[in-house]
Image: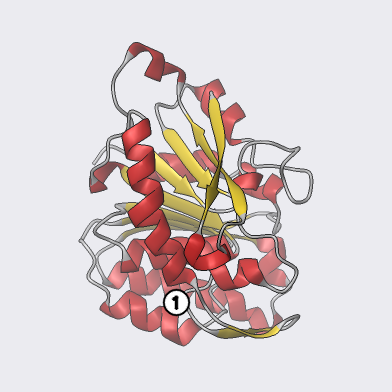
């Protein structure tokens, strides 16, 4: 079951509405409480009709088919024409090839997730709201944000899944964050990249940054699963096929 409603992020886009989505597992009808996975680019998570390129992750189909006892809460990004999504989903100022200099507003995004969206989800739905049962995931810039969230907001998120994360946006600042942010030992991080997208990176730059990021997390005591997906591409169809891998990693009984 998916509940869909409009929300606003006043600090980012004023009164302009966007959609939030919450998936409730079938087991919720019988009572009980459930872990929560927060996701970026919510319009791409469940419905092909809402997805930017006409193909979603098919998350509901997977969860229903497997009977996974998990709540998924996702929020649509801003679709503005001037790099607004990139700005919302970057913790750091950077230069985008197609837009020039952009201000990183990832902190504002995460403050809204943590202080507005999460309390709303916890109050309306049968969540297990504690850190041990709270996770975050995303792809591309959403993958970068997931790494940022699990480091900068480690008190909230016990684990993150970062699929094809944009680690090249500001690798120095990301590395500094991962080295210095307070992080609980045993924080769980799943990371992957598709072999096809890595092959297109000049000098294998992205592969090197990806490996460096995984090592930095392991040095902080995180439990890291890092994969190169054979034949994997930078698209929802490829990320959909990784759902069993990252959910099994995040939800593994510890």
Q: Is residue 121 visible to us here?
A: yes
Mark 1 Cα-neighbour bin, 10 Å: few <14, some 14–19, many ≥20: some
Q: Residue at point 62% right, 49% down?
A: 239
Q: Is residue 88 above or below residue 5?
A: below
Left or right, residue 84 beside residue 90 = right
Q: Is residue 213 above or below residue 248?
A: below
Q: Is residue 14 above or below residue 33?
A: below
Q: Residue at point 45% right, 41% down?
A: 247
Q: Nearer the viewer, residue 13 or 126?
A: 13
Q: Which residue is mark 1?
A: 212
Q: Find residue 191 and report its horizontal and vertical position in percent.
A: 48, 59
Q: Residue at point 24% right, 59% down?
A: 155
Q: Secondary structure at mark 1?
A: helix
Q: Find residue 178 and report its horizontal and vertical position in percent.
A: 34, 75
Q: Nearer the viewer, residue 196 or 190?
A: 190
Quadrant of the image for the C terminus?
A: top left
Q: Is residue 35 visible to us here?
A: no
Left or right, residue 206 beside residue 225 = right
Res. 94 image quadrant:
bottom right
């Amino acid at each position: 079951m998916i509940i869909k409603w409009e929300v606003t992020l006043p600090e980012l886009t004023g009164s302009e509405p966007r959609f939030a989505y919450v998936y409730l597992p079938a087991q919720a009808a019988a009572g009980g409480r459930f872990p929560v996975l927060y996701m970026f680019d919510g319009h791409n998570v469940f419905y092909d009709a809402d997805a930017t390129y006409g193909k979603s992750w098919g998350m509901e189909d997977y969860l229903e088919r497997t009977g996974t006892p998990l709540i998924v809460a996702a929020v649509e990004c801003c679709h503005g024409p001037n790099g607004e999504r990139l700005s919302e989903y970057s913790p750091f100022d950077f230069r985008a090839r197609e837009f020039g200099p952009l201000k990183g507003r990832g902190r504002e995004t995460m403050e809204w997730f943590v202080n507005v969206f999460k309390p709303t989800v916890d109050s309306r739905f049968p969540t297990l709201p504690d850190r041990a049962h709270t996770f975050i995931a995303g792809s591309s810039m959403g993958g970068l944000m997931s790494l940022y969230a699990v480091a900068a907001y480690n008190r909230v998120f016990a684990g993150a899944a970062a699929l094809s994360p944009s680690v090249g946006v500001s690798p120095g600042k990301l590395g500094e964050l991962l080295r210095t942010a307070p992080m609980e030992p045993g924080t769980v991080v799943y990371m992957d990249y598709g072999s096809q997208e890595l092959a297109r990176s000049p000098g294998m730059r992205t592969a090197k940054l990806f490996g460096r990021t995984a090592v930095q997390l392991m040095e902080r005591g995180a439990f890291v699963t890092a994969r190169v997906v054979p034949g994997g591409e930078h698209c929802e169809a490829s990320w959909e096929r990784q759902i069993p891998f990252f959910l099994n990693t995040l939800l593994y009984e510890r």
